[in-house]
Image (spheres, rainbow, N blue to C red):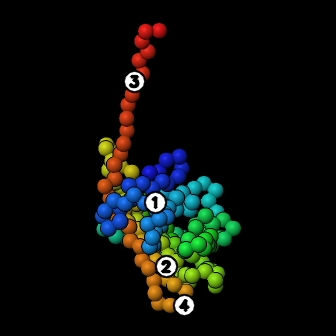
Amino acid sequence: MIYEGGHERYQNITVGGKKTGKNMEDIGGTTSTGEFATIMKGLLSPGSPAQFKYFRTSSSSRHDAAIYDFKVALRNSDWQIRVGGQNLRPAYSGSVWIDKGTGHVFRIEMQADNIPQDFPFDSVQSAVDYDKVKLGTSSFLLPIHAENLACQRGTTICSKNAIDFRNYHKYSGESTITFTGQ
């Protein structure tokens, strides 16, 4: 996954630990995008259409957190859910965990609200965990785990997509241009 120019781009995709030359859309099964930056950017960017309400504090061995519930109205939603040939842009709600010491987001949970009756899923949920990851001499807030759950309408059949983000690499380069013989 590459985040460049404000957009996520996927390449070098593996399935079951093995490289595939296919695009995300051609892999089959359950896939998801947006965990790297799009979800957080859409929810927390200045002028975000999300409505936040303080919920509670939570303490763990790693974080003292403030938890805020949020809602994003249908007219402001940028979440896309695709099943076969059908696309849905739902209203959604959820919670965001923010480290009280650093102000960093370390978890976002969200679920689609008011899914239309003619859509194949009656429940769609997503959760993304973030942490500081050291790349070179700096640390960056990056996703480390995500889970998506979608349940088929009117059944107890659900599909779960669990993603572990690892083996991050930072790339940089230098160049020198020399003009001679002019």
Measured along the vertical axis of the image, is residue 169 above or below residue 146? above
Query: In the rendering, at what x and y percent does residue 21 appear?
Result: 39, 57
In the displayed structure, does residue 130 sit left or right of residue 78?
A: left
Residue lying at the far right of the rendered structure: 75
Q: Which amino acid does label 4 sit on?
A: Gly
Q: Mark 3 points at which residue?
A: 176
Q: Which mark is residue 150?
A: 2
Q: Residue 23 carries which label?
A: 1
Q: Mark 4 points at which residue?
A: 154
Which of the two labelled residues, at mark 1 and mark 3, occupies the earlier sequence position?
Answer: 1
Query: In the rendering, at what x and y percent does residue 137 appear?
Result: 31, 43
- Which of 162 and 46 lies nearest the eye of the viewer? 162
- Does residue 182 show up? yes
Could you say which quadrant of the image residue 12 lies in? bottom left
Q: Which amino acid does label 3 sit on?
A: Thr
The residue mark sitting in front, 1 or 3, is 1
Could you say which quadrant of the image residue 98 lies in? bottom left
Query: Distance between the Cα atoms at labels 1 and 3?
Result: 35 Å
Disc 2 residue crowd, few under 14, some 14–19, many 20+, Cα 10 Å? many
Query: Distance between the Cα atoms at labels 4 and 3?
Result: 63 Å
Query: Distance between the Cα atoms at labels 3 and 2?
Result: 51 Å
Query: In the rendering, at what x and y percent does residue 44 appear?
Result: 55, 59
Which of the two labelled residues, at mark 3 and mark 2, occupies the earlier sequence position?
Answer: 2
Measured along the vertical axis of the image, is residue 181 above or below residue 157? above
